[in-house]
Amino acid sequence: MLHQYAILCNPNLIEIVSEQSSVCSINSNALLSYDKTLFYTFPAQITGTYYIPNTVKVIGHDAFCYSKLQEIIVPESCTEIAKTPFFYMDNLAFLRIPKSVVKILNNSITECPNLRNLTIEMESIPCLDYQSVEIITLGNETKVIEDNALKTAAKLQSIIIPPSVTKIGVEAFKGLKNLKFVRIYRQPTIGASAFMDTRISCGVDCHSTLVDPLILSGVNIKSFGYCCIASVVQNTELIKSLFKIEFLIFILV
């Protein structure tokens, strides 16, 4: 009988074959629990895009260790992701974590150097290893970006904070030297030092009530200088134009 953890982290695994068992089942090339709710492992040598079966509720530890997959789509049935399931995955470029996930450990994503694109739709965005990620897409039902959540996203250049977000935690984006643009909708509360030592500019309208909270969160006041100055310059040119028109009318009279 095949033990559920017998073949974890086997970089040469091509296929999983087993006789009928009261402990495990095989579905879409993956080794699952008998009731198909717990995902144990997947053959490391299979490439391409993989949709985890929609019966899975828990992705177990080291589930995709050494996998050569490029994309993984986690189903809406999943509620929990254990430690290091996405581990030493050199080819992984895209990962989607749905809003149904309520428990994920901070070492769930480890040593995935080419993970460039991450869609994370959880209600509360946790602190994970985002070091290689360049594009982070938040879900339309995301409500909270936790304290220190995205501090490791060193390659992140821009992000859109959806209207559903009500809170951006303390030091959530602190120290992201490549972060240049943040588009914020609605009026979330912004924690201390949330944007300290970033390079964001004109992320909101310079007359927005978010300007002061952003400055208090660590954004250099000069970050808003360009858009505000541009607005002033446009108004100045308008005034000059009006003055010239009035002067011309005066001459004609």
Image (tube, rainbow, N blue to C red):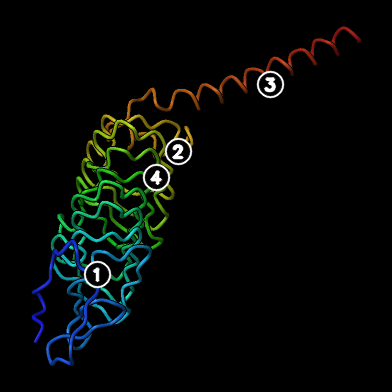
What's the amino acid at mark 1?
Ile
* Amino acid under disc 4: Ile
Kindly report the distance in space between the C-alpha atoms of the residues bearing marks 2 and 3: 24 Å
> What number is the disc on residue 204?
2
Relative height, residue 238 to residue 169 (above, below): above
Q: Cβ–Cβ below 8 Å for labels 4 and 1?
A: no
Crowding around mark 4 (Cα neighbors within 10 Å: few <14, some 14 to 19, many 20+) is: some
Q: Nearer the viewer, mark 2 or mark 1?
A: 1
Q: Amino acid at mark 3?
A: Leu
Of tags 4 and 1, the one toward the viewer is 1
Q: Which residue is mark 3?
A: 238
Query: Which residue carries the number 1 mark?
Result: 14
**On the image, numbered disc 4 is attached to which residue?**
159
Q: Which residue lies at the image location 28% right of the left edge and 44% below the top edge?
A: 132
Q: Earlier in the sequence, mark 4 or mark 3?
A: 4
| Nearer-N-terminus badge (4/1) | 1
Instruction: Using residue 5 as the reference point, say whether residue 114 is left or right of it.
Output: right
- Seen in the picture, residue 232 relative to 129 is either above or below; the reply is above
Per the image, label 4 sits on a secondary structure element best described as strand
Kindly report which numbered mark, 2 or 3, lies closer to the viewer in this rendering.
Answer: 2
Report whether 139 appears left or right of 68. Answer: right
Q: Residue 244 in the image: state x and y as whole percent.
A: 77, 12
Q: Nearer the viewer, mark 4 or mark 3?
A: 4
Residue 40, percent from left and from top: 17, 74
Furthest residue in direction right, as rendered: 252
Give the Cα separation between the discs numbered 1 and 3.
Answer: 70 Å
